[in-house]
Amino acid sequence: MDELIKMTATELAAAVANGDASAAEVTAAHLARIDAVDGQVKAFLHIADDATAQAREIDRKRQAGEPLGPLAGIPVAVKDLFTTVGMPTTCGSKILEGWHPPYESTIIQRLRGAGAILIGKTNMDEFAMGSSTENSAYGPSHNPWDLDLVPGGSSGGSAAAVAAYEAPLALGTDTGGSIRQPAAVCGIVGTKPTYGGSSRYGVVAFASSLDTPGPFGRNVLDAALLHEVMSGHDPMDSTSIDAPVPPVVEAARHGDVSGMRIGVVTDLSGDGYQPGVMTRFTEAVELLESLGAKVTEIRCPHFRYGLPAYYLIAPSECSSNLARFDGMRYGLRTGSGSAEEVMAATRAAGFGAEVKRRIMLGTYALSSGYYDAYYGKAQQVRTLIIQDFDAAFEQVDVLVSPVTPTTAFALGERADDPMAMYLADLCTIPTDLAGNAAISVPCGLAPENGLPVGLQVMAPPLADDRMYRVGAAVEAAFESRWGHPLLAEAKGVTA
Amino acid sequence: MSVTYEEALQKYEPVFGLETHVELGTRTKMFCGCTTVFGTEPNTQVCPVCLGLPGSLPVVNRLAIEYAIKIGLALNCSIASWCRFARKNYFYPDMPKDFQISQYDEPLCVDGYLDVLVGGSTVRVGIERVHLEEDTGKSLHVGGATGRIQGAEYSLVDYNRAGIPLVEIVTKPVPGTGFLAPEVARAYVTELRDVLRSLSVSDVRMEEGSLRCDVNTSLSLAGSGVWGTRTETKNVNSLRSVERAVHSEVERQAAVLDAGGRVIQETRHFHEDTGVTTSGRSKEEAQDYRYFPEPDLVPVAPATDWVESIRESLPDLPSARRARLIAAWELSDLEFEALRNAGALDVVESTVALGASPADARKWWLGELARKANDAGIDVAALPITPADVARVAELVASGALNDRLARQVIDGVLDGEGTPDEVVQKRGLAVVSDDSALLAPIDEAIAANPDVVERIRGGKVQAAGVLVGAVMKATRGKADAARVRDLILERLG
Amino acid sequence: MSITRDEVAHLARLSRLALSDEELDHLAPQLDQIISAVAQVQEVAADGIPPTSHATGLANVFRDDEPVPCLTQEQALSEAPAEELRRFKVPRILVEE
């Protein structure tokens, strides 16, 4: 393996800034890695034609003495849900095959401004609906720990790309756990920022009130670096919060939990949780206690209604958000006859099974006569979950739980069992419903199968820095115990 | 079997309501910064937001909210202290997102009223709600008969209008107006239009579609107090059509009921050419709009200070204008109402401002021009003649350069597109003959040809001179000044 | 059964999805299962609990009425499946709105 691809984003940024490595070399190393392993991982849907040109422009700037951004020369893999100019945006769907948006998302513009090399677009569950990338119209991605396993989802391509050293950083979106769950099962770091902390403009909507763009990195500091660049108020997004970005990089540099009050959510454990996941989670809690944190147990009685509430709210919003894919203005058009017939034929041919399921579920939940019993009730559950969080955060600074009840499952195992698939998001959903922030940090391998387990740290809205502090402390303590980053044990990919 | 309006009214009591859509005159669209200029090249005033491109997001135009509050206040509504936008979900090619951002159970303004004057008395029309939404794109239907959607082979969509802010003003049902229902409906829209114009929130041009009405009509058996099933007539795009639509629906529904049928709750389309409505989509089949709060927008909670400062900025409303004009022009209520209901208030006011006397301005617009507009089936203000033209005609008459008969010919010329009044006068050679010497020959001829009349005049019956004046006018093809001719004849006969 | 196959077919029409009989047969029991599961939200005693549609608590987010550049006509039409007279060409429309 080329040394450059093993370096962290933070190290690469320093190397490019100092002239120890050129952006072109860094980019070439990653393109070579993609060439070598993506046939196995299938993390990418599209590789940027102009990656090398982007890198040369950074090098030119450096030589000309022009200021360089904080991500100058660092390749970033982009979930194929962010609109990009010069690269297609498919959302993992046949209905948008070959769509070239005429505009670019705010976050992509910010990344370009920060000097990032947008190296390619990554695979995902169609329109971010799924927990395995198996719902991609372009075939699944594979887990770099074991190619027969799913990399999680929906941002599975981004997680797999980072875990397979194809890019040091990646962008994802989290609606019910779509960043944290793949990060956990791929053994990397993934963050769902506070809702409204990162702009949704140009991020193709799945469920508007939940969708939150966030970063992936191989360590906590790298994730913080991308988090800080991508965040901040955007006047193009009405739900964007006009407040300073929490000091996440600073927090990630100073992992320290002494005196911190940490709550273990007892409701996120028990039946259905894989023993090895609970073993590693319990160890992580003990570790935190040994580092000086004050650990207490916290009850969040309404979290158990999070999953059903989520599977009403997200499909309802998606049934409306995805109406526009009707074959009239862009994307696939198929069928003949009237506009109504062409729309119905296009949507039937262009959407996959899970998307159809959710559209119909959402249509049902919003229908007159059912609204109050389903959508209305789910919105009330949302209030109750927020109240659970509020009560908890009066007692503790952060909450912790496993990220997902199991380690990575096998490709095909849950593909046509929606209810089983939905359980993957059990622990991550409450944060999305409440609009809080949460991070997934590796906390070891499950003894029974040697697969990575993630620790979820949840923070109140706009207190994203707290979870980075905890994450950095856990990461440092574990890595000194293990003697290396967890990812060093991933052996699924051969190069 | 048909039923006349008079017959219908003997048995039934009409109840109507109006939903009026007004395009606001903001510079930019409701949820994006695209401009709103009318009539530009297709698909040039669009952006990712109003084209509904994946990933785009709406942001509310503050001025549109302000305009809607203004309208609400002018219509005596309460302004919500907190409200939200909602999505109205239905698939349609001219709607880029396949949902419309609108307001559902939380409108910005509720529970107001507008007083309208009909037949010299005031009718209070209740306002149910005023809410904001976005307009759709416009389709061109190709291949069918006369550009209609029915029978077209395909359609071509221009999204320039998509996302233009619309205010929807919904009345409460208006019962109890009896025979006058069509007139009250028209008077309401007229008054509403005048209110909106005075607020400067819209150009309220019905012919360009910036003010459009849907008319709900139902009948109740006289004295029963039970309202029947209502129909919603769309596509009612002139003041005259509002009146005709109610009129025609009353007749149609009465015929259905008299024949033992039942009125179906449905959308109907009004046809300007025939004045009747035809059935559209039946509302009974599956329109489920699945409204829910728009998750891409946050609530609107207008601060009391803001609302009060808007209230203070309200201009003179039409009721104040009415008082002012009635005093200045020395009108009765009925005379004012006639002007207003003819939709002639603005053109008359402009004509007066350009120098015509109020009496002359009213005479031309309510007389000759109102007749022409009626014949053409359009509003008087839509005639191809400007207040400046009418003021000039009045000036020419006042100066003696034209008489009324010639003036009517000048107006015909202007309406036929022959140019300004002065150009028409010149082209048609319409000036009054003011040279006395040119009149002497026809006068002498008239005297010679009517010895008996001359006898009577000489015998003291001066009014008999009218016969001679008529003969002279005929001989001069009306170009003479009749008063002058009369003077000359009397002078001649000693 | 919380939902019948006919209701599923109706939902498909409402969602503009031309599903085959096989798809309907496959989807109906799955939707039935999911709906039964999500109906759990009805167990919650939520009397007097306000609904949350949004977690941010933001209100009154506006923009000024200032024009910004539009897309060019070429950009606007660049992805149109069919185009004529610089407009989006769509099949004939049956249902009037």
Image: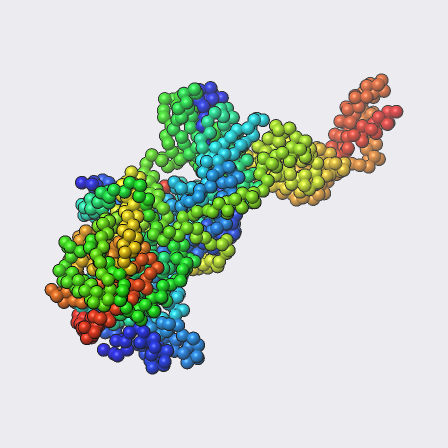
Asked if C10 appears above or below A149 in the picture, the reply is above
Q: Position of residue A254 (x, y in %)?
A: 30, 70
As drawn, which residue projects farthest toward the bottom?
A: A20
Q: Nearer the viewer, residue C96 or A89?
A: A89
In the rendered structure, the answer to whether residue A77 lies left or right of residue B362 reads left
Vertical relation: B255 (above or below) A425: above
Q: Nearer the viewer, residue B177 or B60?
A: B60
Q: Residue B150, image x and y in percent?
A: 40, 40
Residue B398 in which image quadrant: top right
Point out residue A46 in the picture as x, y percentages from the top left corner. 30, 66
* Residue C80 coordinates in the image, percent (x, y): 38, 56
Q: Residue at x 18, y 73 (%)?
A: A482
Q: Residue at x 11, y 64 (%)?
A: A448
Q: Is A436 or B223 nearer to us in this picture?
A: A436
- The residue at 39%/75% (across/down) is A58
Q: How is the image coloured?
A: rainbow
Q: Is residue A319 left or right of residue B399?
A: left
Q: Is residue B10 left or right of residue A338?
A: right
| Quarter holding residue A229 | bottom left
In this rendering, position of residue A222 left or right of residue B239:
left
Task: Answer above or below: position of A156 versus B137.
Answer: below
Residue C44 shows in the view: yes
State the quadrant of the N terminus of chain A.
Answer: bottom left
Q: Quadrant of residue B370?
A: top right
Image quarter (top left, top right, bottom left or bottom right) of the C terminus of chain A? bottom left
| Residue at figure coordinates x 63%, y 41% from the top left | B385
Residue B427 in view: no
Q: How many marks?
A: 0
**Name of the residue lying farthest toward the left:** A448
